[in-house]
Image (spheres, grey):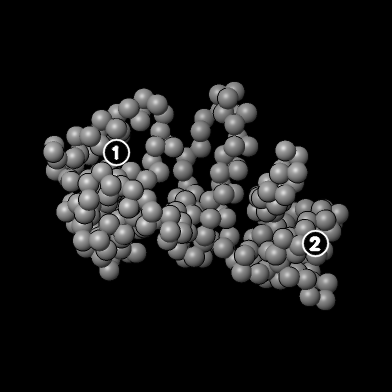
């Protein structure tokens, strides 16, 4: 509905526009006065007069004596923010940006490469999944094989599900793309989770009691999902 667009989606568009126009970077760099923000970001004074109060109303900046200071909600867009502290917002902005590219992609424009920023934002978003969701998903998976001794977590990212399986006594192998593994490795050093680089659509290791795939299917084509599910079936020990 129109009401949903205004209440749910409009704020995300405002923050996305500020990120793309350089407003958020300018604020995070320490510029606080509206006209200086406009000059450094390259936007008009009128735009600054409109968008800065909007950011304040949304809680991303605080207005103090006519100047605007970033809050913790905006700090997550700082490139130096650790992956595990980014939350879902940066990834949601990336998703919005991808949807806005759809007309050009439909007209033949080449799909952009996945950037380091996008990768870290994605992992940060996945790290923000709530504990009840993680525990619930693992419990549902264990209905197929109660208390598996060995688990393959396919496309496991930051390892939220892998950690939960391990806490329940399983020996866990997490498989993901090489760039993902390199980002998440330091965050899993306190575990015994085995990290494996690979492409789940091409092949998977075998011999596991249970193969778990949390979110990978949404980024695959129907043909890729068919291959993926075949590989997941082969990864599990019969019986």
Location of residue 145 in the rendering, given as x and y in whole percent from the top left corner: 22, 46
* Of callouts 2 and 1, the N-terminal one: 2
121 to the left or right of 56: left
Which class describes the residues within 10 Å of circle 1: few (<14), some (14-19), or many (20+)?
many
Q: Which residue is the site of mark 1?
A: 200
User: Residue 38, how many percent across, how many down?
Assistant: 78, 59
The answer, for residue 29, to whether it is visible in the render is no
Q: Is residue 85 above or below residue 150?
A: below
| Left or right side of 76 for 176 | left
Q: Pointer 2: residues within 10 angstroms few (<14), some, or many (20+)?
A: some
Tell me the CA gap for discs 2 and 1.
46 Å
Q: What residue do we see at 51% from left, 33% from top?
A: 111
Question: 223 or 120: which is nearer to us?
Answer: 223
Residue pointed to by mark 2: 53
Q: Position of residue 100 (x, y in %)?
A: 63, 37
Identify the element where label 1 is drawn: loop
């Amino acid at each position: 509905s129109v009401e949903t667009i205004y209440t749910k989606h409009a704020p995300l568009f405002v923050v996305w526009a500020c990120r793309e126009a350089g407003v958020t970077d300018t604020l995070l760099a320490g510029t606080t006065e509206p006209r200086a923000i406009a000059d450094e970001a390259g936007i008009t004074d009128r735009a600054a007069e409109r968008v800065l109060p909007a950011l304040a109303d949304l809680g991303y900046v605080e207005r103090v004596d006519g100047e605007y200071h970033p809050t913790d909600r905006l700090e997550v867009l700082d490139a130096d923010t650790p992956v595990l502290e980014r939350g879902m917002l940066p990834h949601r902005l990336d998703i919005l940006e991808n949807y806005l590219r759809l007309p050009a992609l439909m007209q033949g424009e080449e799909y952009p490469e996945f950037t380091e920023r996008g990768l870290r934002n994605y992992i940060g978003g996945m790290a923000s999944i709530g504990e009840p969701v993680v525990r619930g998903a693992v419990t549902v998976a264990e209905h197929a094989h109660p208390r598996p001794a060995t688990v393959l977590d396919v496309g496991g990212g930051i390892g939220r599900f892998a950690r939960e399986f391990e806490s329940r006594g399983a020996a866990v192998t997490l498989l993901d793309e090489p760039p993902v593994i390199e980002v998440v490795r330091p965050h899993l050093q306190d575990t015994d989770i085995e990290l494996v680089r690979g492409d789940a659509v091409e092949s998977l290791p075998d011999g596991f009691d249970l193969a778990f795939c949390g979110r990978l299917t949404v980024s695959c084509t129907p043909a890729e999902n068919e291959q993926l599910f075949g590989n997941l079936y082969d990864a599990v020990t019969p019986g």
